[in-house]
Image: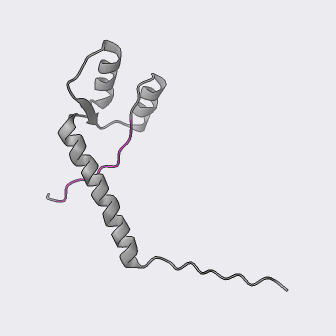
Amino acid sequence: MAPRLVNNKKEPSNEQKLSEYENVRKTIKNYQKFIKANFKYVGENFAYEARSIHYEGKKKSKGIYGNASKQDLIELKQEGIDTQMIPWIEDENN
């Protein structure tokens, strides 16, 4: 005779899932607000600017953020340049 397995875990409701999603979204938006206030946006020139700071010893008054391809990030890491990927949510005001 096979043992009887009972699953007491309930699936989270749609409201719980939505609430969790909204909390994550709010956290990401708060990070974005902090980054925009404290870092310089360099756009598509992120890899170039990161290398300039690293190799030329440029001291920026602010850190930088921008866009880079996965290949750029791999190359920066191989060169010993520390970067972080951050999820970004575009503004809905458009």
Q: What span is colored magenta in the figure?
A: 84-92
31 or 69, nearer to the observer: 31
Report the quarter where the N terminus lies: bottom right
Q: Magenta region's main secondary structure? A: loop
- Percent of width and height locating residue 30: 25, 52
Q: Residue furthest right?
A: 1
- Percent of width and height locating residue 72: 40, 31
- Percent of width and height locating residue 82: 41, 29
Q: Is residue 33 visible?
A: yes
Q: Is residue 29 above or below residue 79?
A: below
Q: Is residue 53 above or below residue 88?
A: above
Q: Residue at x 25, y 53 (%)?
A: 29
Q: Residue at x 23, y 44 (%)?
A: 34
Q: Residue at x 46, y 32 (%)?
A: 74
36 or 44, nearer to the observer: 36
Q: Residue furthest front?
A: 8
Question: Taking 56 as reference, is 77 left or right?
Answer: right
Question: Taking 36 as reference, is 68 left or right?
Answer: right
Q: Residue furthest top?
A: 56
Residue 86 highlighted magenta (yes or no): yes
Location of residue 86 (image quadrant): top left
Q: Is residue 44 visible?
A: no
